Image (spheres, coloured by chain):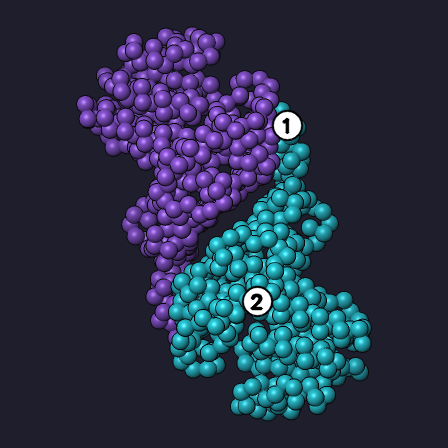
Chain colours: A purple, B cyan
Amino acid sequence: MSEKTVRLAVIGVSGIGQLHLENVAKLDKVELAAVCDVVPERARAAGERYGCPAYTDSDALLRDRICEAVLICTPHYTHTTIGIAALESGHHVLVEKPISVHKADCERLIAAHKRAAHRDERLIFAAMFNQRTDPHYRTIRQLVDEGVLGDFIRVSWIITDWFRTQTYYDSGSWRATWAGEGGGVLLNQSPHQLDLFQWICGMPSRVWSVCSLGKRHAIEVEDEVTAYFEYPNGCTGVFVTSTGEAPGTNRFEIAAENGRLVLEDGRLTFAHNAVPVTEFLRTSKEAFAKPDVEVETFDIEGHGGQHLAILENFADAILEGAGLIAPAEEGVHSVELANAMLYASLTCAPVDLPLDSVAFERELKKLVENSTFAKAVEKEV
Amino acid sequence: MSEKTVRLAVIGVSGIGQLHLENVAKLDKVELAAVCDVVPERARAAGERYGCPAYTDSDALLRDRICEAVLICTPHYTHTTIGIAALESGHHVLVEKPISVHKADCERLIAAHKRAAHRDERLIFAAMFNQRTDPHYRTIRQLVDEGVLGDFIRVSWIITDWFRTQTYYDSGSWRATWAGEGGGVLLNQSPHQLDLFQWICGMPSRVWSVCSLGKRHAIEVEDEVTAYFEYPNGCTGVFVTSTGEAPGTNRFEIAAENGRLVLEDGRLTFAHNAVPVTEFLRTSKEAFAKPDVEVETFDIEGHGGQHLAILENFADAILEGAGLIAPAEEGVHSVELANAMLYASLTCAPVDLPLDSVAFERELKKLVENSTFAKAVEKEV
């Protein structure tokens, strides 16, 4: 072990929590201080396996001050409640995506961090947006930051390769319910793409969407979404996602003044215009001409450090003040996009951003209260 | 010259009309009987070049019974008026796309054909949907017809490589005006894709759309469109088109029960699922499994006979009773789609199909009457 380590507790040890436990074991700079899970046998098994105390109550864990940091990978609603409790008790927090189920909860969570940071400005609050470590997206973000693409004209992300079986949805009583998860593909599978979308393209000013509820699966939440975005500069956007088709598509495209960038099947290309679109359009004397293009294909290997890299960055931020790859505050944007898409669909009207978080929370509560869906859970996993 | 020929007049000899004149000269079975253009010098030049009578008035041409068939490639609104006159006077008609500007005009034109066919059932009425001859689309249509794809889940066509300069729009006073052309990219550039879309995927039952008017160019009609379609079986669709981006995209995608088909950059691939999506989704005992896929890439050369093939097929229909590749009656669908997209955008509401053709015509007339756009035409071409 290195000299300085972060004493970390993992809260929620099923599903993705198991991956995080394995990653903690890989990092010398992180020491597993405890595990916590509401299901006693899961907590005990993880504690035995990793040789650390096991809790079933996160409040007790926080009260015991057994760790200085927590990684929260519980069902979505409790990201907010456990996150606030952890921050208020002075713990560094790394939270799984989405940081909360809805924007109002994001605001509460972020406010808790602000208050806590007022007492300890070195308190770290990060989100598990592991795909921000993927060199494909980092390259795109860099091209955008350097102005290589120029102003955006049209953006599109078709991310429909999130196929899930009915067995998946039947694997947990909280899954794909308004009360338990607060949403479907927009909150569970797509937050990564929604985060990258806003990270690279910024936030739209208007959202319109059709979210189909339980269309392909026996669930009550959305499993198929088509959305239209408008950005402040007039750029348009399309976002399509689904857990009900296979093999599905993952294609991210940016049409910009200086050319067209496409990422699909791990292949990133940029068709570079010799003259920016609008300049050419206005000045060319020919009716059918187009700017000359030169196509560049980027040679990118692998998908970066992913979850392990985010965890290490979190530790480095605590130990050495390193800048965060994914500050949790930025997690509100993907939630706001997901909420706005659902809200637009429920109200059959375009939604102007910023989203009215109070109005959306009210709408979501109605869905929870009016839910009549009886979940058929074969086996809690 | 072969024994039997079709004596054809070409009405409208600028733009695409010039290509048609060249094609007529290539076909032994078609004899150019006359040319016609409202611009006298254009008519005269074409008549001299091809050694045939030149008219400036299509009514006079039809009255003279100098030909048995006409090819109409005039500005859009006159497809209807000249088309009706030609059919009523017993001429076979091949009409450029769109067959009319709006659905009510399509209905008038088709009714004229019905009446004329009542007198002469061998009267041929065809539309210049030349892209139906492209082996890429013919292969897709065949796969669909043979049931290889199975039920559609999601379809998408991003066709944004219709880039046009301002010089293009300034090249004719009728171009890109409500009064002269009745629309923009949906009526002029995209009818081919809209026809193929409905030819392959059928007609949606609901359309929602944002059409941006004069967004990228100094014009009054739409030059950028994003639309969302819903089909009777629940399939969703996206259609995106633009004349304001470069290099642009042409990607047609069908996600179906039996796999995913993609046509882009002339490359047609089909990822074939070993088990249909819905069956796998419902029966798999695994949470994260997907059907196995086998990817087939089709070896397709060239783009088919295009305009020349449609012209020859028209002649064969007249001479030998050959089946039409593109019966003009089917041309109403692409117009209805274009109209529905514009109507949905103008009324900020989804449009259920079949479209109310009277209501749309009223809306279009309002656009014509309220137009204040002063067209800057540098040189009429």
Marking on residue B361: 2
Residue A183: percent from left, percent from top: 48, 32
Q: Nearer the viewer, residue A203 or A141?
A: A203
Residue A334: percent from left, percent from top: 39, 37
Q: How many marks?
A: 2
Q: Nearer the viewer, residue B283 or A5?
A: B283
Q: Examine the rendered structure and indicate whether residue A173 appears above or below residue A273.
A: above
Crowd tier of the residue under label 1, counting other residues whose Cα lies within 10 Å: few below 14, some 14–19, many 20 or above: some
Quadrant position of residue A80: top left
Labels 2, 1: one chain:
yes
Residue occupied by mark 1: B284
Q: Examine the rendered structure and indicate whether residue B150 appears above or below residue B245.
A: above
Q: Examine the rendered structure and indicate whether residue A178 appears above or below residue A13.
A: below
Is residue B290 visible in the rendered image? The answer is no
- Point 60% across, 32% down: residue: A217
Quadrant position of residue B79: bottom right
Residue under mark 2: which chain is it in?
A: B
Q: Nearer the viewer, residue B312 or A229?
A: A229
Q: Is residue A302 left or right of residue B100?
A: left
